[in-house]
Image (tube, rainbow, N blue to C red):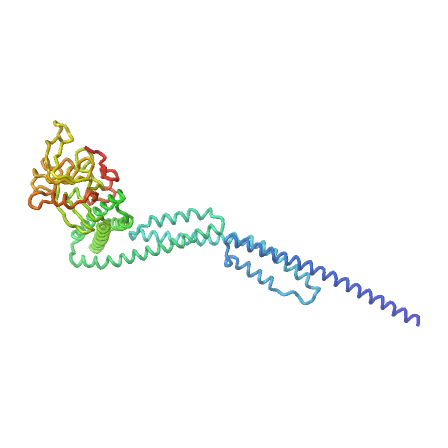
Amino acid sequence: SRKRRGVRWWLAVGLAALVAAAASYAGKAAWDTKQALVAYGGQQRAVEASLQNARSQGFTNEDLRPILERRDSITGTSAPSWPLDRASFYEHQSAQLAQLRQDLKTHLPQVVAGVKGTVTQQAAGLQTLLRQNQEEGGDVGPLQSRLDTVTKALPPAGTIRQVRELQGQLQQLSTDVNTQSAQLKQERDLIQPAAAALLAQNQDVDALRAQGTSALSAARDDATVAAYEAKAGRFKPVDTLMAAVSRLEFYSTKLQAPDREGTAFAAAAEQRYGKQIHDQLVQNLGPQHVIVSFQSQRASFYENGRQVQSTLVTTGPRGDTAFGTDFGPMRVLRKAHPWKMHSPWPQGSPYWYPDTVVQWTVFFTNSGEAFHDANWQPDSTLGPGSQYTEGTRSHGCIHMPWSGNDLAQWLYNWAQVGTPVDVVPGSGQPVADQLGLMTTDDHGNPLHPA
């Protein structure tokens, strides 16, 4: 009937409208999904760019781990199977990635601050260890300087690369400081048996102290020769030798310990480091070398690190004026046989002397100071004190034995031109004090020639 046909028509029209509406909605959903997916992809690329930028600044994946884990969690979530839910899903993911980028900006300064805090703690620990090493006699000066450089540069360091560079320096410094600590312990372990041996030989604290003081004085004089030679550029390993001197001086203060055990340990240490200093000195002397101690008035002659002769001599007073024997790193300049000495002072001067002929002369300054025989002085008067005695002291030369075993002639034949000659105070005082008494320049030229 007509009525039934009308109903069917309206049903068809409604169904068509519903289909059209559904198709329209599905189309819009697909468009929204596409747009959301494009935005999501853009956020992914932006996050990766931010991460890459962080890496280029020096941040590691470990630094970025919280951000990377969140990124992986976000991007690893699968899209819903129902198409109409996908647009909102991608929009939500995009929002999370955008927030992640903001969190990354906050995270990076926190990483820098955290590493700075770690470095600060490490520096404090090293400072404590350095203080302990110093108390054990370690030469911590260079290590302390390196630590100070790091701690000074840390506060203004603003980038992770700058902070990590300082952390790397601190790690190397830590290795060096701990190595020094181990070496100091090893040194203590080596000194202890020697200290026990000294105690077994002598229980008297004054005698133990005297043994240590004797070793200290001899070592200071040896080190002074090395320091003089270093001034002239003839002793290369002076830094190594002076490291032993530093240990020597540290234990010199321990010689005053009130107890026998402490004094014996200090004395054993002085003997140990004194031997190291002496061995390093003689091993680095040239083929020939002459060392004159002013205080003991003794000349010692070395050949390839071995002492071949030693004798008492007579010098003049210290050459801080025109009248005296110079202290410094000199060398054999020339030889003469025989030689007429002519006074550089006019007759009437208290320093004037008549023309005098000597047989064997070895000059070591350009102002006329020389080793030579002195037949007017008995060999028995050579030695300590003769440098001050009227009638025996020289005007700057060094008198050698001449009667019996004629060492003046021996020296003339033995010494080659260029042989180093060091005249040192030989007072047993610290090296710096004896260096301060030099009366030549670094090349052995007298500062107050006659």
- In-image side of 77 versus 204 (left or right): right
Tell me which corner region of the image, top left, top right, bottom left or bottom right, holds residue 41: bottom right
- Residue 95, by quadrant, is bottom right
Q: Position of residue 272 (x, y in %)?
A: 22, 54
Residue beneath the point at 29% across and 51% down: 137
Image quarter hosting the N terminus: bottom right
Residue 30: percent from left, percent from top: 72, 62
Q: Residue at x 18, y 57 (%)?
A: 199
Q: Residue furthest bottom?
A: 1
Q: Residue furthest top?
A: 348
Q: Quadrant of the C terminus?
A: top left
In this orientation, which residue lies closer to the viewer: 43 or 15? 43
Whole-percent x, y for residue 28 in the image: 74, 60
At horizontal 37% and vertical 51% (from top left) the residue drawn is 127
Extreme residue in the front direction = 337
Q: Residue 200: horizontal and vertical position, in percent?
A: 17, 59
Which residue of the protein is positioned furthest toward the right in this rendering?
2
Q: Does residue 47 sit above or below 388 in this rendering?
A: below
Residue 257 visible to the viewer: no
In the rendered image, the vertical position of residue 157 relative to residue 41, given as above or below: above
Count of residue discs? 0
Q: Nearer the viewer, residue 139 or 226?
A: 226
Q: Is residue 10 left or right of residue 198?
A: right
Q: Is residue 228 visible?
A: yes
Viewer-side residue, 441 vs 273: 441
From the viewer's perspective, is 165 left or right of 306?
A: right
Q: Residue at x 44, y 51 (%)?
A: 165
Q: Quadrant of residue 186?
A: bottom left
